[in-house]
C-alpha cells in the first residue's frame, strides 16, 4: 500500500472515530491487530460491542466504499470479532458490525456515512 493511500485511510479512520464518539459510542480499541488481521474500530454502544470497518474513497470510480466488503471480508471480520472477545474476556449481550464510509471533499468538510448493522 502506498504512503498516500495509508494517509487517506488513517484520515478516514480518525474522522470515523470522531463521528462515532460524537454520537455517544465509546472507543474500546483502534486498529486492533492479531496474526489473523485487523479491525479498524471496536466500540461500545450501550450494551452492544460494535466492530467497525472504515472505508475511505476519494472517488466513486470503484463504487461505494462499503461495496469493497465482500463475503470473504465479512467472514474474516466475524472471526476477528470472536478472537477479540475471547482474548479480552469481553462479554456483550449484543455484537454488531458497522461500516463507516468517508468521502473526502475537494472543498469543505468530508462526508461521513455510518451504516449500522451493515452485515
Image (spheres, rainbow, N blue to C red):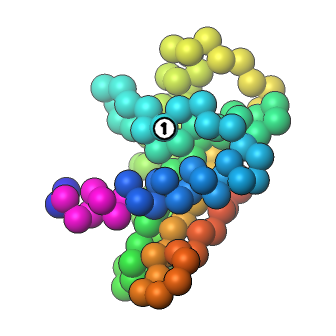
Instruction: Tell me what residue is drawn at x 42 percent, y 87 percent.
Output: 106
Give the structural element (helix, strand or loop) at label 1.
Answer: strand
For the N terminus, give its image quadrant: bottom left
**Which secondary structure is most common in the magenta stretch?**
helix
Instruction: Tell me what residue is drawn at x 43 percent, y 49 percent.
Output: 73
Can residue 118 be seen from the camera position used here?
Answer: no
Residue furthest to the left:
2
Residue at the disc numbered 1: 30
Look at the picture and state if 1 lies above or below 79.
Answer: below
| Residue numbers of the magenta segment | 3-9
In this rendering, position of residue 92 left or right of residue 67: right
In this rendering, position of residue 39 left or right of residue 33: right
Instruction: Using the image as rendered, state which of residue 119 and residue 39 is in the foreground.
Output: 39
The image shows residue 119 at horizontal and vertical percentages of 63, 53
The image shows residue 47 at horizontal and vertical percentages of 81, 31
* Magenta-span inclusion, residue 8: yes
* Magenta-span inclusion, residue 16: no
Look at the picture and state if 53 lies above or below 113.
Answer: above
Amino acid at each position: 500500500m502506498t504512503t498516500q493511500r495509508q494517509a487517506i485511510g488513517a484520515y478516514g479512520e480518525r474522522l470515523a472515530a470522531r463521528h462515532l464518539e460524537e454520537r455517544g459510542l465509546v472507543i474500546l480499541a483502534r486498529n486492533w491487530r492479531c496474526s489473523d488481521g485487523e479491525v479498524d474500530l471496536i466500540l461500545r454502544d450501550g450494551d452492544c460491542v460494535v466492530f467497525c470497518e472504515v472505508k475511505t474513497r476519494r472517488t466513486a470510480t470503484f463504487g461505494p466504499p462499503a461495496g469493497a466488503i465482500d463475503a470473504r471480508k465479512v467472514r474474516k471480520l466475524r472471526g476477528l470479532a470472536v478472537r477479540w472477545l475471547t482474548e479480552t474476556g469481553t462479554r456483550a449481550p449484543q455484537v454488531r458490525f458497522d461500516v463507516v464510509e468517508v468521502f473526502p471533499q475537494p472543498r469543505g468538510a468530508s462526508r461521513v456515512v455510518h451504516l449500522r448493522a451493515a452485515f
